[in-house]
Image (tube, helix red, strand yellow):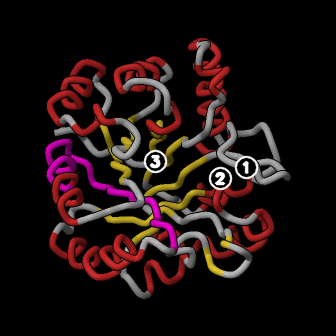
């Protein structure tokens, strides 16, 4: 059994969307990330439990978080719960379904709170989606109200800071952190610019992340951070450049959180 370490920095495997899982583990190990946030919707080799176990044994780096797709159903969720138990994972994060995907939305609403009760060692979280509208009328995603996630559905939130509107991030979110953090086992870290291009490498653009990390440090946040960024295809072909990007993200985190 892996020792569950908290306050650790994970590498989300969907950051390296065009790479195989072996390469993702190798880069995480080489760059001294503490673990893997395994996006099962992104890579079919992650569905093979024995293969994932071999990578864990080979690189001596754990999978701490499992990330599921936005089209969840009973069969898949039961399978992923067994995978989580096999790998000693204690967080399952679910990407919010589209607003019009009524089947997936209703499955989460009707069943996930009961799954949480039945599997108390695992935290089932919804990743907060971006606040966007269809035809300027309907929300594009379900579960866009974070307060409803834990107040109505009794679930926790995997907090993706890139999906929060900039003005709310700078003003409201940091003020609300003391009340929000008990419901947040994972914080997804990335940056974004003024044109709303999001999930950019840390420290390169516009968000007031140092203030956010400082507040988390003061509040003694003791769960997981996960670097979840989008890397351009032209950069992905150069492994050394990818290493540099990921190394800068980790250094930024260490300077603004661990080494305050």
Closer to us: 242 or 33: 242
Q: Is residue 194 left or right of residue 91?
A: right
Disc 1 to disc 2, how far (Cα)? 5 Å
- Asked if labels 2 and 1 touch by Cβ distance under 8 angstroms, the answer is yes
Q: Earlier in the sequence, mark 1 or mark 3?
A: 3
Closer to us: 45 or 247: 45
- Asked if labels 2 and 3 touch by Cβ distance under 8 angstroms, the answer is no
**Image point 50% across, 45% down: which residue?**
226
Disc 1 to disc 3, how far (Cα)? 16 Å
Q: Which mark is residue 7?
A: 3
Q: Position of residue 209 (x, y in %)?
A: 72, 51
Q: Is residue 174 left or right of residue 57?
A: right
**Image point 52% across, 59% down: which residue?**
220
Instruction: Give neighbour class at mark 1: few <14, some 14-19, many 20+ (Cα, 10 Å).
Output: some
* Res 247 quadrant in image: top right
In the image, is residue 85 part of the stretch drawn in magenta? yes
Where are the magenta residues, as a range?
Answer: 81-99
| Element class at badge 3 | loop
Closer to us: 218 or 129: 129
| Element class at badge 1 | helix
| Element class at badge 2 | helix
**Mark 2 = which residue?**
213
**Outermost residue toward the right?**
194
Q: How many marks?
A: 3
- Asked if labels 3 and 1 touch by Cβ distance under 8 angstroms, the answer is no
**Image point 59% across, 21% down: which residue?**
236
**Mark 1 = which residue?**
210
Q: Is residue 15 left or right of residue 164?
A: left
In the image, is residue 93 part of the stretch drawn in magenta? yes
Q: Is residue 77 above or below residue 238?
A: below
């Amino acid at each position: 059994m892996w020792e569950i370490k908290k306050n650790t920095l994970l590498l989300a495997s969907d950051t390296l969307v065009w790479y195989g899982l072996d390469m993702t583990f190798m880069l995480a190990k080489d760059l001294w990330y503490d673990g893997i946030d395994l996006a099962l919707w992104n890579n079919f080799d992650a569905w093979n439990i024995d293969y994932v176990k071999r990578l864990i044994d080979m690189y001596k780096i754990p999978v701490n978080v499992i990330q599921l797709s936005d089209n969840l159903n009973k069969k898949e969720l039961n399978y992923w719960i067994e995978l989580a138990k096999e790998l000693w994972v204690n967080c399952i994060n679910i990407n919010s379904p589209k607003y019009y995907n009524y089947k997936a939305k209703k499955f989460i609403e009707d069943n996930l709170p009961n799954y949480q009760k039945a599997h108390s060692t695992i935290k089932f979280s919804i990743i907060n989606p971006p606040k966007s509208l269809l035809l300027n009328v309907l929300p594009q995603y379900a579960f866009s109200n974070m307060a409803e996630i834990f107040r109505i559905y009794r679930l926790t939130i995997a907090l993706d800071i890139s999906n929060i509107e900039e003005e709310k991030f700078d003003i409201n979110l940091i003020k609300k952190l003391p009340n929000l953090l008990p419901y947040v086992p994972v914080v997804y870290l990335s940056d974004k610019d003024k044109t709303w291009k999001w999930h950019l490498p840390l420290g390169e653009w516009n968000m007031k992340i140092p203030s956010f990390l400082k507040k988390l440090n003061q509040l003694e946040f003791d769960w997981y951070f996960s670097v979840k960024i989008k890397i351009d295809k032209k950069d992905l072909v150069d492994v050394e450049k990818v290493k540099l990007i990921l190394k800068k993200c980790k250094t930024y985190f260490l300077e603004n959180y661990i080494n305050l």
